Image (cartoon, rainbow, N blue to C red):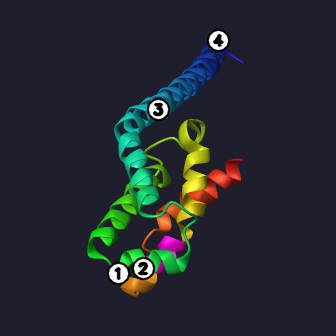
Amino acid sequence: MELVDISTIIASIITAFSFLFSSLIYFISVSRERKTKTLDYWEQVQPSLIEARQNLQNLNQNEWTKEIAKKHLASSHNSLIISKGLNSFERLSIGINLNIYDIKVIKQLAGKMIIESYIAYIPIIIAREEQIGESGGFREFEKLYARLIKLN
């Protein structure tokens, strides 16, 4: 083996390590940026989620049932409040399910609240889907719920 061959091998090894190191740094920075973006987004969306939960609680102090949800959905005013509340959770869910935001950060910030909200609002979602005659209106919220349950 000649000196040129050895220097070529060493240069190739150094290049490979440089590539691996650069890739690692890139993935770490992308992950950190996603986490930061998630925290920023959470600060923006948290008040609307709290308001949505409060508004839904004001409509019905007890546990939601499909019959209670149908009664409230019959009123255009209440239907608007319900749709707005569920859409708040749906928008958050879309960003997380598209991996724009970090699910682990959301889990730490509000995982329990999101899980409890989904369970509480299943009757409303079912009644709303029946009302409009279309299923799958809040699938992103359902997917987020399933992912959070899986993380627990």
Decide: few, some or many residues near mark 4? Use Cα within 10 Å; few <14, some 14-19, many ≥20: few
Q: Residue type at mark 1?
A: Ala
Extreme residue in the top direction: 3
Image-quadrant location for residue 19: top right
Q: Secondary structure at mark 1?
A: loop
**Residue on which the image places disc 4:** 3
Q: Residue type at mark 4?
A: Leu
Question: Residue 124 placed where, x, y %?
Answer: 48, 72
In the rendered structure, which segment of residues is drawn in magenta?
123-128
**Residue on which the image places disc 2:** 71
**Residue on which the image places disc 3:** 30
* Disc on the earlier residue, 4 or 1: 4
Image-quadrant location for residue 149: bottom right
Which residue: 52% across, 65% down?
121
Viewer-nearest of discs 4 and 1: 1
**Residue on which the image places disc 1:** 74
Q: Residue type at mark 2?
A: Lys
Name the magenta segment's main secondary structure.
helix
Q: CA distance from mark 2 to mark 1?
A: 5 Å
Is 56 covered by the magenta stretch? Answer: no
Q: CA distance from mark 3 to mark 1?
A: 46 Å
Which residue: 60% across, 62% down?
119
